[in-house]
Image (cartoon, rainbow, N blue to C red):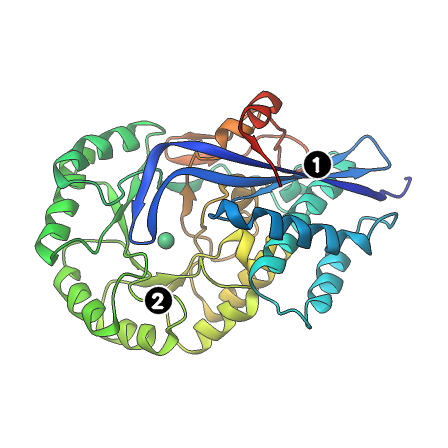
Amino acid sequence: MEDLLFKEVKIRAVDLPLKNPIVSHLGTFERWPYLCVDIITNQNVIGNSYIGPYLKEYLPAIASSIKVLCKSNEGKIIEPYTFYQNSMKSLSLLGFKGIPLYGLAALDIALWDAFAKSYNKPFVKLFGGSIKNNIKAYNSSGLWLIKNDKIAQEAETLKRNGDFKALKLRIGRESFKTDIQAYNEVIRGAGPDIVVMSDFNQCFSKNQAIKRCHALDDIGFYWFEEPVQYNMLEDMNKICREIKTPIIVGENFHGPKDAHNALLNNSCDMIMPDLMRIGGVSGWLKTASIAESFNIEVSTHLYPEVSAHLMCLTPTAEWLEWVDWANPIIKDPYKVKNGNVIIPDKAGFGIEWNESVISEYKIDL
Ligand SMILES: [Mg+2]
């Protein structure tokens, strides 16, 4: 078989409107920015990935990191494992976190995609796993900090679009009573069997968090997500010891080492790494092994397409977070049936671009 060589990278930026605007403690977002990355090879194979780094003003800085990381790989054989190890090493002077890590993740995912496509296999099969048909997902595409009288109807709609068995509600409202009322509205709209995750989006100080989590501890939330600022490991350790409902963090782990530190410190009961911040597919797989050694469940954060493949390779896999925000730029978006994400039997991650949408919402880098 002819070697698969890295020829060049193509990076495009889009700013997509969201169907449901995000209203959270971290801000209000009407649109979501993406970088779409294509790895061009010497064969009839293109590796695709996207990342959605929240703030469109930083897209040029991330794109520039991607170009720097590519320089030493042009003309070389595509070997995603070697790329990750060498690239991480190269970041030791700049730091292993933030913007360069996001660039590394975008490339890592695209390289694994190209690699799997060159063998004409879905990524999970190339890796020696099997496509599972029971990857349970919760719908996270709504239930932001909206008025309580709008919650029941939205919960019903979110449940129905995919027959979801679980939904996520954003909390940390004016009082514990309005949080409880919001929970009850989800149940009223989606039925008594619905599983309800919750997310505080880091809105509290330690003492506020303990007070609120105590007040909500027995009402039925499946987990409490990020009650305090994400890097407050000692505070989270105290909250975990005080509260019965599992505490989950992880979307703000920058690389596998952050996951290891949080678990060593007993700062959470479950984790939910984000593919962009954990270091792409390679960073995820390392983190999955760390979680296995701590016997801790792993859920996902955004990026449902690639995450679905990785859940098949994660020994302690729990819930996949379903959002459809990137669907417009993907030619054949993934589907959810009976609350489970369906992995298409396509080479790589099965992400091809919807070029007309990319052209319509393209922004300058
Ligand atoms: Mg969150």
**Residue on which disc 1 sits:** 121
Image vertical order of residue 132 relative to residue 53, above or below:
above
Instruction: Where is residue 41? Give x, y as percent.
Output: 82, 38
Q: Is residue 110 visible?
A: yes
Tell whether label 1 touches label 2 (CB within 8 Å).
no
Tell us which disc is closer to us: 2 or 1: 2
**Rendered residue at 34%/53% (across/down):** 26
**Measured Cα–Cα span from mark 2 to mark 1:** 40 Å
Q: Which residue is drawn at 69% across and 41% down?
A: 113
Residue 180 in percent (x, y) is at 12, 51
Q: Quadrant of residue 130?
A: top right
Left or right: where 104 falls relative to 210: right
Q: Residue flagged by tag 1: what amino acid is it?
A: Lys
Q: Is mark 2 on a helix, strand or loop?
A: loop
The label number, if any, that marks residue 229 in the structure image = 2
Where residue 339 sits, quadrant-wise, is top left
